[in-house]
Amino acid sequence: MDLERLASDEDAFPLLYIQAFEWFNEGIIPAIQLEKMANSIPSDILDELEGEKEFHAAGIIRLRKKYPKIYKHFNEDWDELLEELTEGFNREMKRELRRIR
């Protein structure tokens, strides 16, 4: 499964797996268990990852190309997240994202 491949992909931005896992399991795993899983990750690490907007945005673009099934399954969610992440990006930063392969 692509989700398992993403979990072991050392080049993937870590938040991508966490988000995909939560979205895939929403409604399957009780919300309280998903919350416990999310809380098992130290908050300082999560805060640091969430602050890496450029890497996060680049990761979403790579996800679109390398894991198209995961991307397509939650297309609207990924697009919305990418829009949020790139909101303050200047033209050059957005241009660099388009060059990602």
Image (tube, helix red, strand yellow):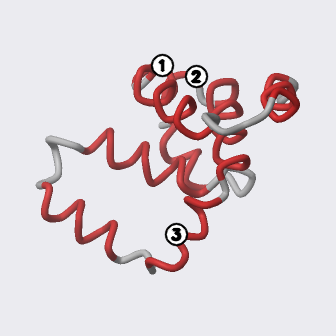
Name the residue nearer the viewer: 52 or 74. Answer: 52
Q: Is residue 48 left or right of residue 21?
A: right
**For the residues carrying marks 2 and 3, which lies nearer the camera in this image?**
3
- Is residue 45 placed above or below 66 in the rendered structure? below
* Residue at position x 43%, y 75% in the image: 41
- The answer to whether the residues at label 2 and label 3 have Cβ atoms under 8 Å apart is no
Name the residue nearer the viewer: 32 or 4. Answer: 32
Mark seen at residue 34: none
What is the C-alpha distance between the residues marked 2 and 3? 27 Å
What is the C-alpha distance between the residues marked 1 and 3? 27 Å
In the rendered image, residue 3, in percent from the top left (x then y), is placed at: 48, 42
- The answer to whether the residues at label 2 and label 1 have Cβ atoms under 8 Å apart is yes
In the rendered image, residue 89, in percent from the top left (x then y), is placed at: 72, 37
What is the C-alpha distance between the residues marked 2 and 1? 6 Å
Q: Is residue 24 left or right of residue 96?
A: left
**For the residues carrying marks 1 and 3, which lies nearer the camera in this image?**
3
Q: Which residue is mark 1?
A: 72
Q: Which residue is mark 3?
A: 47
Q: Which residue is mark 2?
A: 68
Quadrant placement of the C terminus: top right
- Is residue 88 placed above or below 42 in the rendered structure? above
In the rendered image, residue 25, in percent from the top left (x then y), is placed at: 26, 44
Query: For numbered disc 3, what is the local secondary structure?
Result: helix
- Is residue 64 placed above or below 60 in the rendered structure? above
Q: Name the amino acid type tagged 3.
A: Asp
Q: Name the amino acid type tagged 1.
A: Lys
Residue 73's image quarter? Answer: top left
Q: Name the amino acid type tagged 2.
A: Pro
- Is residue 55 placed above or below 88 in the rendered structure? below
Q: Is residue 81 left or right of residue 54?
A: left
Of mark 1 and mark 3, the one earlier in the sequence is 3
